[in-house]
Amino acid sequence: AIVLYIGERSEALLPREAGARHRATQWLIAALNSIEPFVMDVARIDAFYPNEEWAKLRRPSAVEFVQKRLGALSRSLGDKAYLDGDRFTAGDLMMATVLRILSHTDIVTGDKRLAAYLDRCTARPAFKRGLEAQIGDFRKAA
């Protein structure tokens, strides 16, 4: 909701042209509904239950399923720099944020296309500033 709210005020995140705007919104929702739940299955197992027998049995199928989702994402990305071509949008912001959840694994980086995409997204100066501001808040609260 915050990204959409900010995007309404920033053509950099939500283009004015209706088709591009709709695609950016679709990718944002896809990140949260089609990718993140399955990413979180693996992350939850790894973070909270790594030594539980049920988790050791569940993790391989969770990884396999997220890899299928990420394979479809990789194919959709194709040779484009970003999800909708050469332009970074709110969809890329949310997708990169979701993909970063698996940074403790090689699940995303094992796909060269997704690894390069994530590197492009997170190397952007605005992404770095935003992440540093967020981490700075956590440091102050610690």
Image (cartoon, grey):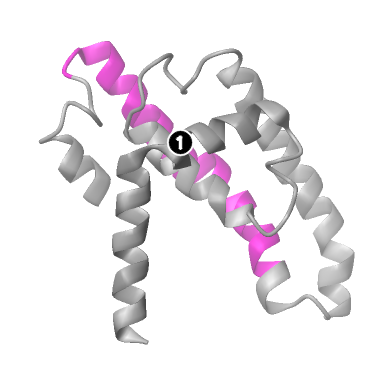
Q: Which residue is drawn at the image coordinates 72% and 69% (left, top)?
A: 46
Residue furthest out toward the left: 9
- Residue 37 pos. (x, y %): 57, 52
Magenta span includes 34: yes
- How many marks the image carries: the answer is 1
* Lateral position of residue 18 relative to residue 33, left or right: left
User: Depth check: 41 or 75 in front?
Assistant: 75
User: Depth check: 90 or 126 in front?
Assistant: 126
Q: Is residue 32 visible?
A: yes
* Lateral position of residue 86 relative to residue 19, left or right: right
- Residue 48 pos. (x, y %): 67, 78
Q: Which residue is drawn at the image coordinates 33% and 29% (left, top)?
A: 89
Residue 63 drawn above or below residue 76: below
Q: Residues within 10 Å of mark 1 (few under 14, many from 20)?
A: many
Q: Which residue is drawn at the image coordinates 21% and 14% (left, top)?
A: 18
Which residue bears the numbered disc 1? 121
Residue 53 drawn above or below residue 39: below
Residue 137 drawn above or below residue 103: below
Residue range corresponding to the magenta coloring: 16-45
Q: Which residue is drawn at the image coordinates 32% and 35% (left, top)?
A: 90
Residue furthest out toward the bottom: 142
